[in-house]
Amino acid sequence: MKKEFDYKTRGTCSRMIHITVEDNIVTDVRFIGGCHGNTQGVAALVKGMAVDEVIRRLDGIDCGGRGTSCPDQLANALKENM
């Protein structure tokens, strides 16, 4: 089953994440805003990865003492929507 959703980020430079998951595998991630090279890198690395593995690897990553980061927000989006 394919699921697409948008997640409004909190506490990061990126404003939104568009995520596509098919059969519990992340197939596409697009960050709106944020550090373009870094968010492109994160998106490329998680493509083809199981949702649970993405959450396990990215949950809790902090950026500059903000208590969150773009990768952490991706983990939060998956936790809340899957």
Image (spheres, rainbow, N blue to C red):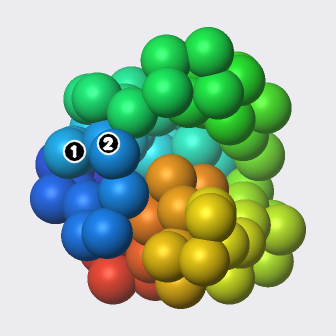
Residue appearing at x 60%, y 77% in the figure: 65
How many neighbours does mark 2 have within 10 angstroms: few (below 14), some (14-19), or many (20 or more)?
A: some
Give the camera-side residue of 60 and 45. 60
| Relative to 55, 34 lies left or right | left
User: Given the image, on which type of amino acid does mark 1 rest?
Assistant: Met
In the picture, measured across the screen, residue 27 lies left or right of residue 73, that is right
Q: Helix, strand, or loop for circle 1?
A: strand
- Quarter assignment of residue 51: bottom right
Residue placed under numbered mark 2 in the picture: 14
Q: Position of residue 4 (x, y in %)?
A: 25, 43
Residue 54, horizontal then vertical, whole percent? 72, 61
CB within 8 Å, label 2 to label 1: yes
Amino acid residing under circle 2: Ser
* Residue 75 in view in this figure: no
Return the residue found at the far front.
64
Which part of the image, by quadrant, shows the C terminus? bottom left
Residue drawn at (58%, 43%), measured in percent from left and top? 26
Look at mark 1 in the image and give the residue it sits on: 16
- On screen, residue 49 above or below 39: below
Q: CA distance from mark 2 to mark 1?
A: 6 Å
Q: Number of callouts in the render? A: 2
The percent position of residue 80, horizontal first and vertical second, equals 33, 82
Comparing labels 2 and 1, the label whose residue is closer to the camera: 2
Q: Which mark is residue 58?
A: none
Q: Residues within 10 Å of mark 1 (few under 14, many from 20)?
A: many
Residue occupying the point 31% across, 69% down: 11
Q: Nearer the viewer, residue 9 or 79?
A: 9
Identify the residue at image location x=68%, y=35%: 42
Residue 58 visible to the viewer: yes
